Amino acid sequence: MVIYYQALRTVEEDVKNIVLAHSVGIQESLEKHDIEYMKVYIEEILKDIHDPHLVIALHDKRLVTGNIATWPYKKITPKGWVEITLPPSKFRTKPMLILANITRHRDGKILLVGYDLYRLQLFKDTLGITLVENVAISFGIAFFVSLLLIYLLNRHMRNLNQTCERIMQGELTHRVKLSGADDEFEYLARNINAMLDRNGMLLQLVQDSTNALAHDMRTPLSRLRIKLQQALEQPALSEPVQQNLYEAVEHTDGLVTMFDNILQIAKAESRTDTQQFKNFDIGLLLHDIGDFYATFIEDKKQTLELHIPETPVIFCGDQQLLAQAISNLLDNAVKYTPRKGTIAIALTADADFITCTITDNGPGIPELFWEKVKERFFRLDQSRHEAGTVLGMSLADAVAKLHNGQLNLEDNNPGLRISLILPSHP
């Protein structure tokens, strides 16, 4: 746009220079000669130049000399630069818009020198069209380049996002695909892969250490429990000593259970046992688990409701791990549901999913911690004084992922609703 106005200004200055050049020359002659000489002089200029776009006129009150038929002003003639539209006459067949310079001289003589603005208007129109065309071409090129950049960025970002999604879904060994290009995106992909390799190594080290510790501790803990049990069988033990031994046995059982859960989580997370999947009736499994916990539920005056279809619901999976996961979820519900509360187990199945839902009317879990409770050893502040290994939810989540399912937590208002959603065809 700046170039456009600069070009127009340059052409207009050229027109003014042409006008001023003729005007100055005629004014010098006008100072020295009379009107008759000036008439011939102006006619000779017009004849020699032979430029139909040049307009020269001299007005001396009685007649007009030059190439205009009549003076364009009837009353007062202005001075300086003006734009004038000349009507058709014997000198031109069409109206003409000129840029003129008007000067006054002695004896009331008025000199008008002008130039046709047709060329300026033509240049303005041509330049305007060219400017619009260039803007359109530039916009088209910029638009195409923008689309190309967006495509390239989206392609690289899609690659990164897909990698992040698959890692979040549990595929910790997945990495960003490398294109082989020597650019910043390739460097970024390599750095991300290196970071994932490092994090995977550290995570595997922690998990291997935890699993090895759990495996190695089970045998000495079992021996310790046997020793404590033998000590309890000794005669003549005082009541405080017996109570302490009973508590020691309970704590030992808790540690053994915790290590067993760690090993079960490791087994589920390893994803190497899918070849051991087999078909079983998950409805019958829920009945067995409900019967096992019936005594504990009755002791707390709680009510257990079972909503299980009468027809078998066949599922292909690891029956032992699923039984352990559901038992942990039900155990949590029994533990945190108050006396005379209600616990419900529901099973639904369709062509795509099998859903096992356990609900209670206990204190529930704030939505902020619904994902955190699935982590190993995470415990809410209000439950830190409770006994337990805080691995039940982690095991259930690991078992769900092993079967390509998911564990969802919802508000039961009051209480908690936990849904173990499994694909009908894992």
Image: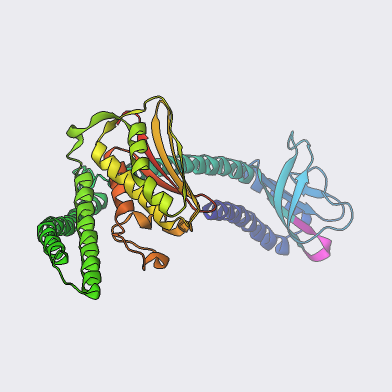
Q: Quadrant of the C terminus?
A: top left
Q: Position of residue 350 (x, y in %)?
A: 42, 27
Asked whether residue 358 appears in the rendered view, the answer is yes
Residue sitting at 65 percent across and 61 percent down?
A: 24
Residue 251 spot, x, y in % from top left: 23, 64
Query: What are the residue bounds of the magenta stretch?
Result: 105-111
Q: Nearer the viewer, residue 191 or 78?
A: 191
Residue 375: x %, y % from top left: 31, 56
What residue is rendered at 58% in x and 43% in y? 128
Q: Position of residue 84 (x, y in %)?
A: 76, 49
Vertical side of 424 occupied by 36: above or below: below
Q: Is residue 205 left or right of residue 130?
A: left
Query: Is residue 162 toward the left or the right of residue 266 in the image?
Result: right
Q: Is 37 covered by the magenta stretch?
A: no
In the rendered view, does 400 fall on the left or right side of 82?
left
Q: How is the image coloured?
A: rainbow
The reply to whether residue 196 is visible in this rendering is: no
Residue found 37% across the figure and 48% down from its top:
295
Q: Is residue 144 above or below residue 74?
A: above
